Amino acid sequence: MKVVVSVGGSVLAPNLEPDRIGEYARVIETLDEAGHEIGIVVGGGPTAREYITTARDLGANEIELDQLGIAVTRLNSRLLIAALGEAAAPAPVESYDEGRAALRRGDVPVMGGTVAGQTTDAVSAALAEHVGADLLVYATSVPGVFSADPNEDDDAERYEEIAAGELVDLIAGIEMNAGSNAPVDLLAAKIIERAGLRSIVLDGTDPTAVRRAVETGEHDGTDVVP
Amino acid sequence: MKVVVSVGGSVLAPNLEPDRIGEYARVIETLDEAGHEIGIVVGGGPTAREYITTARDLGANEIELDQLGIAVTRLNSRLLIAALGEAAAPAPVESYDEGRAALRRGDVPVMGGTVAGQTTDAVSAALAEHVGADLLVYATSVPGVFSADPNEDDDAERYEEIAAGELVDLIAGIEMNAGSNAPVDLLAAKIIERAGLRSIVLDGTDPTAVRRAVETGEHDGTDVVP
Amino acid sequence: MKVVVSVGGSVLAPNLEPDRIGEYARVIETLDEAGHEIGIVVGGGPTAREYITTARDLGANEIELDQLGIAVTRLNSRLLIAALGEAAAPAPVESYDEGRAALRRGDVPVMGGTVAGQTTDAVSAALAEHVGADLLVYATSVPGVFSADPNEDDDAERYEEIAAGELVDLIAGIEMNAGSNAPVDLLAAKIIERAGLRSIVLDGTDPTAVRRAVETGEHDGTDVVP
Amino acid sequence: MKVVVSVGGSVLAPNLEPDRIGEYARVIETLDEAGHEIGIVVGGGPTAREYITTARDLGANEIELDQLGIAVTRLNSRLLIAALGEAAAPAPVESYDEGRAALRRGDVPVMGGTVAGQTTDAVSAALAEHVGADLLVYATSVPGVFSADPNEDDDAERYEEIAAGELVDLIAGIEMNAGSNAPVDLLAAKIIERAGLRSIVLDGTDPTAVRRAVETGEHDGTDVVP
Amino acid sequence: MKVVVSVGGSVLAPNLEPDRIGEYARVIETLDEAGHEIGIVVGGGPTAREYITTARDLGANEIELDQLGIAVTRLNSRLLIAALGEAAAPAPVESYDEGRAALRRGDVPVMGGTVAGQTTDAVSAALAEHVGADLLVYATSVPGVFSADPNEDDDAERYEEIAAGELVDLIAGIEMNAGSNAPVDLLAAKIIERAGLRSIVLDGTDPTAVRRAVETGEHDGTDVVP
Amino acid sequence: MKVVVSVGGSVLAPNLEPDRIGEYARVIETLDEAGHEIGIVVGGGPTAREYITTARDLGANEIELDQLGIAVTRLNSRLLIAALGEAAAPAPVESYDEGRAALRRGDVPVMGGTVAGQTTDAVSAALAEHVGADLLVYATSVPGVFSADPNEDDDAERYEEIAAGELVDLIAGIEMNAGSNAPVDLLAAKIIERAGLRSIVLDGTDPTAVRRAVETGEHDGTDVVP
């Protein structure tokens, strides 16, 4: 199966400790060795937030902040590449074509952000679309797609399954209300919808959840169905 | 004044005739010589649409279609560069940093698209934000921002002025309803809002309208106010 | 067999309709699957001519016109890449070394122009020389090499076979007389001669003619013999 | 005066707080406005150390660790660029030629590391040599060159002045004893010697010390004399 | 006046001695300081020939030989750049757009070859066309354009003046006869003709001849007139 | 076995004659075909020295001299690539990641220098570390590591074996005394030590010595043991 896994920065490297990253590497290697084709997109996480906060104080504009964030996603990618060793393409992948080429020659591409104005949520969906992935997994810090922000609303309920079109509507609504957190951003949701990508949003704090989802389709998150 | 002008592909080169492009070049040169700093972002227009239609028939995915569209925006950029001669940076600009560097050394950067998933509407707003533009002008094929799609609804009214936040809401609403045309896309509107960019959306079929808007602030389109 | 096929822009995409491109893709896939190593060079065709005409009107110099033409050859390459899907290198190839590397790892390289002052005729011959091709096929809009321009001279006769040295002389003579069309340009002919490349010039409007020529050596065009 | 300033990562961004970076930006702007030509090289500091520690745990080799460190120096460069605004070249400079070109056109180049196996100490000296700098300032976390490691040896004395040749010998001796800290590394010292670069090593925790050293030649560190 | 000077490799560096290169640098600096805009294209000369001979023996194809030759033209360019110091763009220029950009910002671009299949004769003419040069000077090892090869035919006469069209015919004739040396190659001559470039072919063994030709129009070579 | 071979420029191309290069190519092909993974790093040799001497006379700084030297290492790389044909990556490799990627896909990477301030000695060690080589062979113009410079001291004795730490000390001592030649430079020795690289320094004038060393571990040079 061809799978793109989007690993949030706070999920991969909550405090830069090697354990979580090593566990992700083992999951990816296991899937790779089992014959799956795996592409990874890594987020920025806490390091990105720290740099962005400082740069904003120093008067950086939002484009410069995005550029900082992208640079951190590539730093984080290098950590995962180091842990993957020979399985991974040796340098962070910077374009969709490069990601596709790596996958085709049997390497695991590890990709960060691409350009200001585009999150790694959207990069993940675009990479999945470009390589014709069978499955896109978002390993995030929330355990799925909810009817409301679970941190703010006790009645928030997790969807076991949601249609891609509904996901777009839900997120468009969330993005209207600044301050709320969407599980993936609107551009990502739109790409998922248009590409008919089978997707899963799950809690990535346990990397083996990703492995189980790929191998068995079972998980405790949300299925986004085309 | 530092100004970014976004020229839609159908506005710049509706049928690849040189007249319109030449008129745009003259407007830009006039503004440049008057001491304004001008950056240009060019869209894809009819050529992009033709290539995209054919590629879709051939089984291209949306990322590949975007890549084709971006390649055409750079082709169109070369036409404008040829017409601008010594005033322009000699090759199409491909990143925000490059655009900012060109502007700083006194050249007119002419930029097309950047990466799949990002329109030239959004590129224009991002470039304007990155260079700290005083004004962003969208020279489009519709004469401003309307309460509804003027091609479909006779009661559609043009806003003389609209707040950036309202623009975001309006476009979010439009994008919900597939098939309707927004004057600029949602990401562009959000960048305009967050950056507090003074913007004008106007009918670009007459290039001198751009010149008048920059020189006098007068125009028949819509002011987007921060 | 290692083969470079040069597909003229007017042959591949006379009016950007997908059918012809799709047929070429099928021919290439068939040859690829049969174990042949195939490299493709694509020309600019009508879109290049339109952009060049407009740019010339706008005062572009010939180097800028060539740059536009090259950009269009890469656009056209993307169409063929989209149609080829997994068989092709995912982005247009821009150098001879890249083309050779793609071929070696089993991908079909699709290449356009390289630099101002060099046509895709010459690029095709140079790529063929660099990869050590067994055969170079020019799929053009004229059905072979003629003793005179068949559009202007009723007595023009098609050569079934011509020695590479004679081809050089013939084309040198044609290029002396502006306005006449050579089947390939002089630099291409010289490379064919010096490299001792077995070449075929044939009518490419029927893509299966290319397949037949590669598979059986039979065709209705002209054999250029070393 | 043409000056290259090497700002250690722990000096520029000990904990990523914006104050120190902002002060450095003001010092650079002041010198720039006073007509000095300033080039900056930025180190990796604590963020680099954190990433390197984690990556080493994950099995990265030293080349990969250096690559991580270089990526962080460029992140840090972006912070300083954001604070410098229009005075700086808009993106981190990655080669000596680029640094020289930026300086020549009146921009402040901000550079990080270049390639594995070369520290920013050495990059600073090489940039200074390449641009023909009149002065090279190392703004470090130790207040000069000492006869021994001041953190380990109470009798360590600071040199007010040291010849470049002696500096090379001193550092060669220090590098023999693993665990000891040299104020600059051996390659840097050798470049300083061969290029006859007037250099100052000073405590960079107070950025105005750099300004005073450039403007008056006075400082509380060590003069390295050619 | 805007001038492109093409300096043959055997003229610039007949045996890699610094004197000739230094004299060329002084001539260029003098012209630069006098307000002329100067672009330089440098050939490969004896070093290129040695490498090419060896590589041919080792089985290199002609494309690889051209690549070697191009690499040597860039080596030679670096020698001239070193001698020019601050007047020159700091690295060899590799594209026509880059050369034009350097000239515009007041640097002397020093360029070598571009791509296999294109000589530095042709590169010089193309650069001259692209920057809109008023004059193109070929500083070669023969003292002008002759009616026949002066080394082989005692009756060979030097043209004081020749029309560009006649030059094309003359060179086409020469290229027919392998072994004969043309003063510039056919592509160069064709670009000169189409661009209407005023050109001079002169003996470059005395660099001051180039200076005199630019400053006074006087020389002992051949004027190629549009 | 994974092996990096560092071939000094004077060893590979003492006077640019093809024989030695051809012999090296045959040795590499033989090892490649026997299943070893081979990476090559090539030095600058006499051509580099000539260019550097001339450029120094012309006032080049040491960074520019290094850049010239690096350019020559890539020229020499192209000679070896030509001789290797299909076994080698088609263009000189310019980064450690690229070298690793080439090796992984089964090509022989041929690499020259990387950046000013870093010799090909150090590049060889760094590449060996980055690819996880089992063996690093320095094919040099001296037959091993000596207790003193064998050209100056008759009592100089060759080490059959030396510990990496001792090698570092030995070379540090040699580098103190300008004018003396070290078999490899200090940075290279340090990388060998830290990476625990099994290394051999041997006389490369007979290329088959490299083959014997790889195949049997036997040689007449010096073993550097981790």
Image (tube, coloured by chain):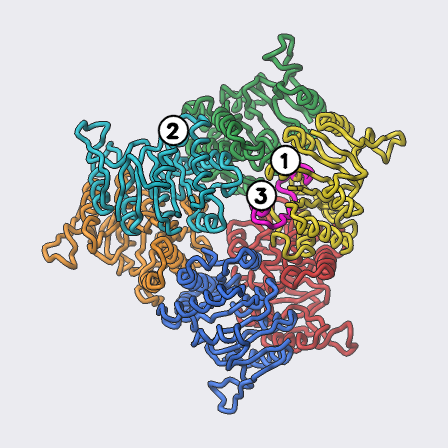
Chain colours: A green, B yellow, C red, D cyan, E blue, F orange
Q: Chain of mark 2?
A: D
User: Residue at 50% of width from left, 66% of height from top?
Assistant: E34
Along the horizontal axis of the image, is B198 left or right of D95?
right
Q: Compared with residue F43, is residue B128 higher up or lower down, i.e. above or below? A: above
On the image, the x and y values in percent for residue F82 come to 43, 61
User: Residue at 49% of width from left, 41% of height from top?
Assistant: D88
**Quarter of the figure with the C terminus of chain C:** bottom right
Q: Which residue is mark 1?
A: A129
- Circle 1: element type: helix
Q: Which residue is mark 3?
A: B100
Q: Which residue is mark 2?
A: D46
Residue C216's label in the rendered image is none
- Highlighted magenta segment, given as a residue range: B96-123
Query: In this view, which residue lies farthest toward the top?
Result: A154
Along the line of sight, which residue is nearer the eye, C197 or B61? B61
Q: Are marks 2 and 3 on the same chain?
A: no
Judged by depth in the image, the label closer to the viewer, 1 or 2, is 2
Q: Are marks 1 and 3 on the same chain?
A: no
Query: In this view, which residue lies farthest toward the left?
Result: F155
Query: Which amino acid is tagged 1?
Result: Glu
CB of mark 1 within 8 Å of CB of mark 3? no
Query: Which amino acid is tagged 3?
Result: Arg
Crowdedness near tag 2: few (<14), some (14–19) or many (≥20) residues, C-alpha within 10 Å: some
Q: Chain of mark 3?
A: B
The span from disc 2 to disc 3 (Cα, nearest Å) is 31 Å
The span from disc 1 to disc 2 (Cα, nearest Å) is 38 Å
Query: Which amino acid is tagged 2?
Result: Pro
